[in-house]
Amino acid sequence: MIIRSEKPSDIEAIAEVTKIAFEDHSFSQQTEPFIIRDLRSAGALTLSLVTEVDGRVVGHIAFSPVTISDGTTNWYGLGPVSVLPDFQGRRIGTALVNNGLSLLKSMGGKGCALVGSPAYFHRFGFWNHPQLIHEGTPQKVFTAKSLFGPVPSGTVEFHPAFKQLSVIEKEAVTDVIIDYTIAGIKADPADPAIASLVEKEILTEMPDGKFMLRHSVLAEYDAYFAQVSRFRAAEMGRVHKNPFLAAVTYGKG
């Protein structure tokens, strides 16, 4: 077993390992490969380590910078960490975490935070600290480990790459964009995807029961979708300002 930093030739293998490792996890929204992709694109993959067995990438771990509201610097987020199912139980994940934390400390890292199973990460010294929170995450699954000095007090923000929409949320957003009208669209608030988009404030329910798409909030989760939605809104705006075009488009007159 070899643990090393990722190389450009590993990128596809890392995405595949991450996808397979999380596909049967009920808590996963299947966004983990995209998180790693966006961290890499943003130059925010502080550490990206792979485990290689017989020349094959079978595990991966990512570390990226976090911000803390009290101004503490040099803290990082751990995750995602992935091991192919056929290779789980061989302490590959343990080796990845330990190697990553050791490297992080040697680089001047002061601490690390994560969202994950406390039962698993307690073995590495990750514990819940009431003074350190991550908004929207149950405190019991948000843990941290100091590598140097005290644990900070404040709110932790992970890199924007972690704000990924799930597949069903993306499908719902696509439907909203396609059905877009100036007056908003009709949607079922009981639909889990719609409810999630409302919770994230991407969709806002109007007094008449219709929903409006907030392009600026969508941009925090998916810049491409936000660009498409703005274009769609602009096109619809031009249609409504041109009665003749509206008549042709909607078969009126």
Image (spheres, grey):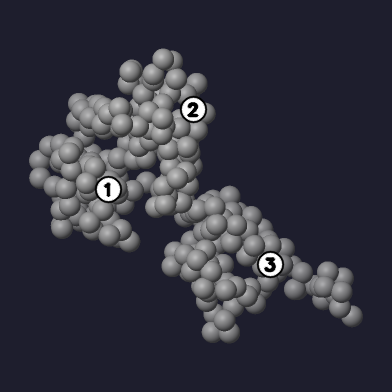
Q: Name the mark on residue 149.
A: none
Residue lying at the far left in this picture: please name it: 149
Give the label, 1 or 3, closer to the camera. Answer: 1
Q: Quadrant of residue 136?
A: bottom left
The residue located at (19%, 30%) in the rendering is 105
Secondary structure beneath dot 3 equals loop
Q: Are marks 2 and 1 in contact (CB under 8 Å)?
A: no
Q: Earlier in the sequence, mark 2 or mark 1?
A: 2
Q: Earlier in the sequence, mark 1 or mark 3?
A: 1
How far from the left and from the top, in percent, is residue 84? 41, 32
Question: Looking at the picture, does residue 242 appear above or below residue 193?
Answer: below
Tag 1: Cα neighbours inside 10 Å, few (<14), some, or many (≥20)? few
Residue 42 in sight:
no
Secondary structure beneath dot 1 equals loop
User: In this view of the protein, which residue sits in the foreground, 209 or 117?
Assistant: 117
Q: Earlier in the sequence, mark 3 or mark 2?
A: 2
Residue bearing mark 2: 13
Secondary structure beneath dot 2 equals helix
The residue located at (82%, 76%) in the rendering is 243
User: In this view of the protein, which residue sits in the foreground, 155 or 24?
Assistant: 24
Please, what is the three-letter code of the amino acid marked with disc 1? Ser
Please, what is the three-letter code of the amino acid marked with disc 2? Ala
Q: Name the mark on residue 179.
A: 3
Q: CA distance from mark 2 to mark 1?
A: 25 Å
Q: Name the mark on residue 117.
A: 1
The residue located at (59%, 61%) in the rendering is 172
